[in-house]
């Protein structure tokens, strides 16, 4: 069978080697503690599950959902943005619910790129930005995120010939994988840059509600003029521990929201309605599970940062997201250090290079394991302390 050439554009899975090693260890009956995956360990709050169950029993929700998303959900999303960020959105034109934000992120590339067009993509970054750009026939120009610039890209150094071909810039703050955050001054620069060069902005923001020490992350759409140039993706996955239910949204620029709707509506038939109803409850119901959950993450963050420092890694405590981006000791590549942690401590992390070339010299650890596993992981890491 001959498969489409575009599938060849999907780069080889970067964690092949490490995944094979983990599988081998497990096959030998050895226990591996994984700090590799960011997926909330707390359950979805009870009031949300209750509304989901009730909705599942209602036959109205057994039929095809409305493709665009229930108007009540679009209103709930607009209401949440207004309360949380003081951002005003037209629920009919500037809001589109998604089957998880990953789906929307991936499909947006197909709405913005023709062959030969360029996507500006952060390195390190969530792999979907680059892979969807390539699948859409576009080219990728990487924007290095380096520690000396607080992991914010330098928009001034992008060559003029690239800017001419660039159609979109992808950004993500609070950032996966570095845990970095961005403030209004940076977003103002982004809006000016986008206007000057006629480049669409896609801000992927699933971690705005996972923050510590009283810090409140910003929405890109708070920035004056943002809606003229871009959209923001948000998700209920990380905010309400709902990764398993698959629901998120894109909001902002009407032309981009509408383009994504036109594209998507030919591929999917909307989000199961019971899940949309659960999302309405999540966005409009009580919000007090979030600070409690963040408090728990914050304690784990502090413990993990301390343990990593004790075994010789350099870490800046993240103010948001559930990732620790740790600089490894010199003398190792990220892949070697990852293998060493697995072999010597039975602990899995992700090599920074899994997120791009500029991730060399780092590993990423997540703080989303249940406490007993998390604490066992910390204990194992500490066995590597120089004796
Ligand atoms: C988790 C994550 C997503 C996807 O979230 P879903 O809504 O579950 O699809 C998107 N972008 C980044 C950077 C993420 O870490």
Image (tube, rainbow, N blue to C red):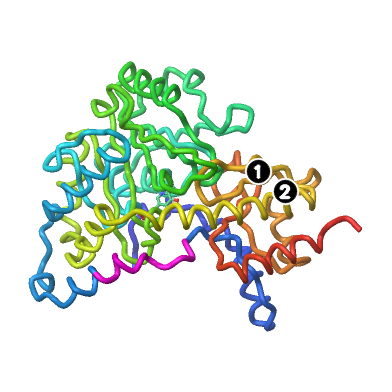
CA separation in Å, label 1 and label 2: 7 Å
191 on left or right of 51:
right
SS at mark 1 in the image? loop
Q: In this view, does 361 lie above or below 294?
A: above
Most distant residue in the right direction:
387
How many numbered discs, if any? Answer: 2
In the image, residue 248 lies in the stretch drawn in magenta: no
Residue 129 - label? none
Q: Tell me what residue is drawn at x 32 percent, y 26 percent.
A: 199
Whole-percent x, y for residue 98 in the image: 25, 53
Q: Which of 49 and 142 is in front in this view?
A: 49
Q: Nearer the viewer, residue 5 or 331?
A: 331
- Indicate which disc, 1 or 2, sits on the residue closer to the N terminus: 2
Q: In this view, does 25 lie above or below 128?
A: below
Q: Nearer the viewer, residue 16 or 310?
A: 310
Task: Report if residue 160 is visible in the image.
Answer: yes
Label 2 neighbourhood size at 10 Å, few (<14), some (14-19), many (20+)?
some
Question: In terms of image quadrants, where is residue 33?
Answer: bottom right
Q: In this view, does 274 lie above or below 206?
A: below
Please name the residue that numbered disc 1 is placed on: 360
Q: Give the range drawn in magenta.
A: 40-50
Residue 333 - label? 2
In the image, residue 45 lies in the stretch drawn in magenta: yes
Quarter that holds the C terminus: bottom right
SS at mark 2 in the image? loop
Label 1 neighbourhood size at 10 Å, few (<14), some (14-19), many (20+)?
some
Whole-percent x, y for residue 296 in the image: 54, 57
Whole-percent x, y for residue 316 in the image: 65, 40
């Amino acid at each position: 069978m001959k498969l489409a050439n575009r599938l060849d554009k999907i780069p080889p899975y970067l964690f092949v080697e490490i995944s094979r090693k983990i599988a081998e260890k497990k096959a030998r009956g050895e226990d591996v503690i994984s700090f590799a995956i960011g997926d909330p360990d707390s359950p979805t709050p009870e009031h949300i599950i209750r509304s989901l169950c009730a909705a599942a029993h209602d036959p109205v929700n057994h039929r095809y959902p409305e493709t665009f998303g229930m108007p009540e959900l679009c209103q709930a999303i607009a209401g949440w943005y207004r309360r949380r960020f003081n951002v005003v959105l037209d629920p009919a034109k500037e809001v589109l619910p998604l089957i998880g934000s990953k789906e929307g992120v991936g499909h947006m590339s197909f709405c913005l790129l023709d062959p030969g067009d360029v996507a500006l993509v952060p390195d390190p970054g969530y792999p979907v930005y680059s892979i969807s750009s390539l699948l859409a026939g576009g080219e990728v120009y990487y924007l290095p995120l380096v520690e000396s610039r607080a992991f914010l890209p330098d928009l001034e150094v992008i060559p003029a010939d690239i800017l001419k071909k660039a159609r979109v810039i992808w950004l993500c703050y609070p950032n996966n994988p570095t845990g970095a955050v961005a403030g209004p001054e940076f977003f103002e620069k982004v809006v000016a840059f986008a206007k000057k060069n006629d480049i669409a902005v896609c801000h992927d923001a699933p971690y705005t509600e996972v923050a510590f020490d009283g810090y409140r992350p910003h929405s890109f759409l708070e920035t004056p003029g943002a809606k003229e140039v871009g959209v923001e993706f948000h998700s209920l996955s990380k905010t309400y521990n709902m990764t398993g239910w698959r629901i998120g949204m894109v909001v902002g620029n009407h032309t981009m929201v509408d383009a994504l709707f036109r594209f998507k509506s030919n591929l999917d038939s909307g989000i199961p309605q019971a899940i949309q109803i659960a999302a309405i409850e999540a966005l409009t119901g009580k919000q007090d599970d979030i600070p409690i959950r963040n408090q728990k993450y914050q304690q784990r963050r502090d413990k993990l940062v301390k343990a990593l420092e004790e075994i010789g890694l350099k870490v800046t405590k993240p103010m948001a997201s559930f990732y620790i981006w740790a600089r490894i000791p010199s003398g190792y590549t990220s892949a070697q250090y990852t293998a060493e942690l697995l072999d010597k401590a039975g602990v899995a992390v992700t090599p920074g290079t899994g997120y791009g070339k500029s991730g060399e010299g780092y590993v990423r650890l997540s703080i989303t394991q249940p406490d007993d596993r998390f604490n066992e992981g910390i204990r194992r890491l500490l066995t590597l302390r120089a004796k």
